[in-house]
């Protein structure tokens, strides 16, 4: 899947950065140690950094393993804001590399939802990767993704809603109804699976996933799940 | 730079990468200066020309290629 391919590149970068830093610092330490009077302060600073970078790389791996694990589907109370915090460290670096400003507006009082945390993370990740992709032709200064959360009352029940807003071309000219069709894609090289899989995950959770055009520019995807008391 | 040491300028938005590069260059006796964005590098432009520029291509805002 394209999303997975993109993620793989992003993950490789996220692990390679700290590894490159570790190699540079370790090489610096070896050089300092070879001196007649080793510069211990510099060596200590570099080694502190080696530890920190190794932890950073390990943390990326831990997150990936959690995200890609094929553990059985679970149904447990989840907080959508926690899910945002799980996913942003993964998607954020890739968005920033695309020159995209990432903003959040997270309501603190969202109802919890019942579901599979990993699957919900995958849905949000897919929406963020799509938002980034949608802005590949957008002028650099307009590239912006906003993740919002809110609570909404529907027929006496409280729902938790996440929205991912981009500043891409939107889908005014597209057949909106086709967005969630499997194999329908607007991305070069895309398979058109991301949104259809995401929608099926959300519907299995008793929720809804839909897209709207923004008044100005861009599109917003909304993920709504029934809250639990 | 008031010494004759070659100066390497590093422009990278990843702090860990840029600091480790700075330490590596320092360990081999070079002077290094670091910048987190292309804009910061341009804003600090001075009379002396760097001997070498280590530039990240994918930077937020102005990209390495734009620079």
Image (spheres, coloured by chain):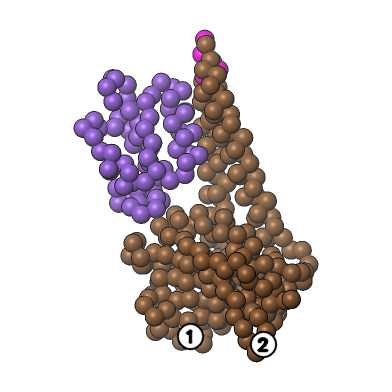
Chain colours: A brown, B purple
Magenta-colored segment: predominant secondary structure: loop
Q: Which residue is mark 1?
A: A176
What residue is drawn where x is 56% and y is 34%? A49
Q: Which residues are magenta?
A: A32-36
Q: Nearer the viewer, mark 1 or mark 2?
A: 2
Which image quadrant for residue A227?
bottom right
Q: Is residue A20 covered in magenta?
A: no
Label 1 neighbourhood size at 10 Å, few (<14), some (14-19), many (20+)?
Answer: some
Figure quadrant of the N terminus of chain A: bottom right
Q: Secondary structure at mark 2?
A: loop
Instruction: Out of A45 and A19, give the one closest to the viewer.
Output: A45
Q: Which residue is mark 2?
A: A156
Which image quadrant for residue A209?
bottom right
Mark 1 or 2, nearer chain start: 2
Figure quadrant of the C terminus of chain A: bottom right
User: Do marks 1 and 2 share a subunit?
Assistant: yes
Image coordinates for residue B15, horizontal then vertical, percent: 47, 41
Image coordinates for residue B58, horizontal then vertical, percent: 41, 51
Can residue A182 be seen in this snapshot? Answer: no
Q: Secondary structure at mark 1?
A: helix
Which image quadrant for residue B10?
top left
Report the side of B67 relative to A187 (left or right): left
Image coordinates for residue A60, horizontal then vertical, percent: 62, 50
Q: Chain of mark 1?
A: A
Q: Is residue A33 covered in magenta?
A: yes
Report the side of B45 relative to A25 (left or right): left
Q: Chain of mark 2?
A: A
């Amino acid at each position: 899947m394209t999303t997975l391919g993109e993620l793989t590149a992003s993950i490789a970068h996220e692990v390679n950065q700290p590894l490159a830093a570790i190699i540079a610092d370790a090489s610096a330490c070896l050089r300092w140690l070879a001196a007649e009077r080793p510069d211990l302060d510099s060596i200590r600073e570099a080694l502190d950094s080696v530890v920190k970078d190794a932890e950073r790389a390990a943390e990326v791996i831990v997150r990936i393993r959690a995200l890609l694990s094929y553990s059985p589907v679970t149904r447990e109370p989840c907080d959508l804001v926690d899910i945002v915090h799980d996913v942003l460290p993964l998607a954020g670096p890739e968005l920033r590399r695309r020159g995209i400003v990432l903003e959040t507006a997270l309501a603190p009082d969202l109802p919890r939802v019942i579901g599979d945390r990993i699957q919900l993370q995958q849905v949000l990740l897919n929406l963020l990767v799509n938002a980034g992709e949608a802005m590949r032709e957008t002028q650099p200064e307009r590239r912006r993704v906003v993740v919002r959360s809110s609570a909404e009352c529907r027929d006496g029940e409280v729902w938790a809603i996440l929205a991912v807003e981009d500043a891409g071309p939107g889908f005014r000219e597209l057949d909106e109804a086709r967005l969630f069709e499997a194999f329908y894609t607007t991305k070069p090289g895309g398979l058109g699976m991301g949104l259809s899989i995401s929608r099926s995950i959300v519907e299995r959770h008793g929720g809804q996933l839909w897209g709207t055009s923004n008044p100005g520019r861009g599109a917003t995807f909304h993920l709504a799940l029934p809250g639990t008391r | 730079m008031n010494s004759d040491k070659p100066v390497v300028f590093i422009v990278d938005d990843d702090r860990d990468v840029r600091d480790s590069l700075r330490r590596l260059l320092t360990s081999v006796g070079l002077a290094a200066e670091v910048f987190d964005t292309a804009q910061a590098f341009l804003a600090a432009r001075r009379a002396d020309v760097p001997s070498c520029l280590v530039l990240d291509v994918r930077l937020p805002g102005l990209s390495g290629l734009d620079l």
